[in-house]
Amino acid sequence: AAADYYDMMLAAIVGYAGLKPTLKAIDNGKAIALANKETLVVAGDIVMKKALEKRVPVIPVDSEHSAIFQCLVGEGRNKIEKIILTASGGPFLGRKPNFLVNVKRDHALQHPNWSMGAKISIDSSTLMNKGLEMIEAKW
């Protein structure tokens, strides 16, 4: 992030660890291609304020946010009434509340649509990941 021989930094370090290099790149006036939601979840106000001050674009590359970003290009700020961030429903879609009371970790790791690591599978199964995406979308 501190080097000067690039134009854009792909910020894809997982978790909180991605914040420091992202801020350093912004300080150096480098455009940010953001693939790390945690950076905005933990410090969206700081990151976006600094990006605005330095006139650095922060471009989302994570699927949902990139799609929203692309849809908004050329649209006036007041024209959008609602944006819906979708979810697959995960392994518990359509289950009755009494089933959910006894859910175990192994159930949550069985995502019906794709294979992911344990943390993201749990976060997706419990919709925690969608909550983090909502916070990210604020910025």
Image (cartoon, grey):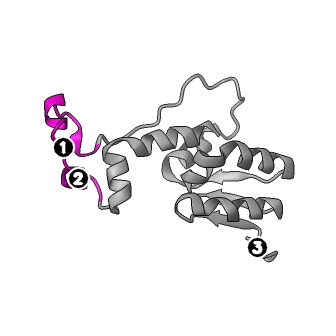
Give the CA separation, mark 3 to mark 2: 42 Å
Tag in front: 3 or 1: 1
Q: Where residue 34 sits in the image (x, y, percent)? A: 62, 56
Residue drawn 14% across and 30% down?
98
Mark 3 surroundings within 10 Å by alpha-carbon count, few (fewer than 14), some (14 through 19), many (20 or more): few
Residue 80, relative to residue 64: is it above or below?
Answer: above
Quadrant housing residue 36: bottom right
What type is the residue that disc 1 sits on? Val
Q: Which residue bears the numbered disc 1?
A: 103
Q: Which residue bears the numbered disc 3?
A: 6
Residue stretch in magenta: 90-114
Give the CA separation, mark 2 to mark 1: 7 Å
SS assignment at label 2? helix
Q: Is residue 23 magenta?
A: no
Q: Is residue 95 magenta?
A: yes
In-front residue for pair 42/78: 42
Left or right: residue 130 compared with residue 31:
left
Q: Quadrant of the C terminus?
A: top right
Q: Where residue 97 sits in the image (x, y, percent)? A: 18, 29
